[in-house]
Image (spheres, helix red, strand yellow):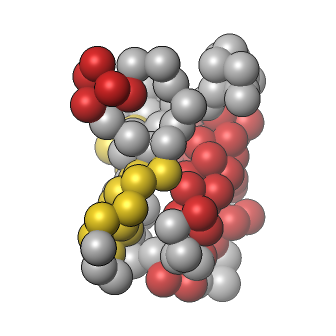
Amino acid sequence: MRKLSSSGSPFENSIGFSRACRVGPVIAVAGTASLSDSGETMHKGDVYGQTKRCLELSLKAIDELGGCTEGIVRTRIMLKDIKDWESAAKAHGEIFSTSNPPVPLLR
């Protein structure tokens, strides 16, 4: 079984991607940007807000594909500046404080 969750991007077909893909019991989520439903960048200059929005979009896709927060086994957050790790970690903690998946903070 292969099922996709669309990001709504007009580039999905020409580039060949989707927000997330489920094959059997495994769901993989693509890199996600802090975008509104209309495609505008949200929370410019606010690492906490951007992280929270990206995680919300990811969780929405996971839910659409029949997954749940407790089933997440790894997260990854990429930062432009590692000094911003606390803001990103705060957003991550608000969502995952009960399931505690491993999260490498990359820059």
* The image quarter in which residue 63 lies: bottom right
What is the x, y in percent for residue 74?
A: 37, 69
| Quarter that holds the C terminus | top left
Residue 23 visible in rendering: yes
The percent coordinates of residue 10 (x first, y second) are: 48, 19
Of the 4 image quadrants, the one containing the N terminus is bottom left
Describe residue 15's horizontal placement relative to residue 56 as left or right.
left
Residue 60 occupies quadrant = bottom right
Q: Residue at x 61, y 30 (%)?
A: 34
Q: Residue at x 66, y 76 (%)?
A: 97
Q: Is residue 75 left or right of residue 91?
A: left
Rendered position, 89 above or below 71 = above
The relative height of residue 15 versus residue 104 in the rendered view (above or below) is: above
- Say above or below: 24 vs 53: below
Q: Can see residue 77? A: no
Position in image of residue 70 (x %, y %): 56, 84
Give the quadrant of residue 17. top left
Q: Position of residue 42 (x, y in %)?
A: 71, 22
Question: Nearest the camera: 75 or 56?
Answer: 56
At 54% from the left and 75% from the top, the residue drawn is 66
The residue nearer to you, when weighing 90 against 27, is 27
Q: How many marks?
A: 0
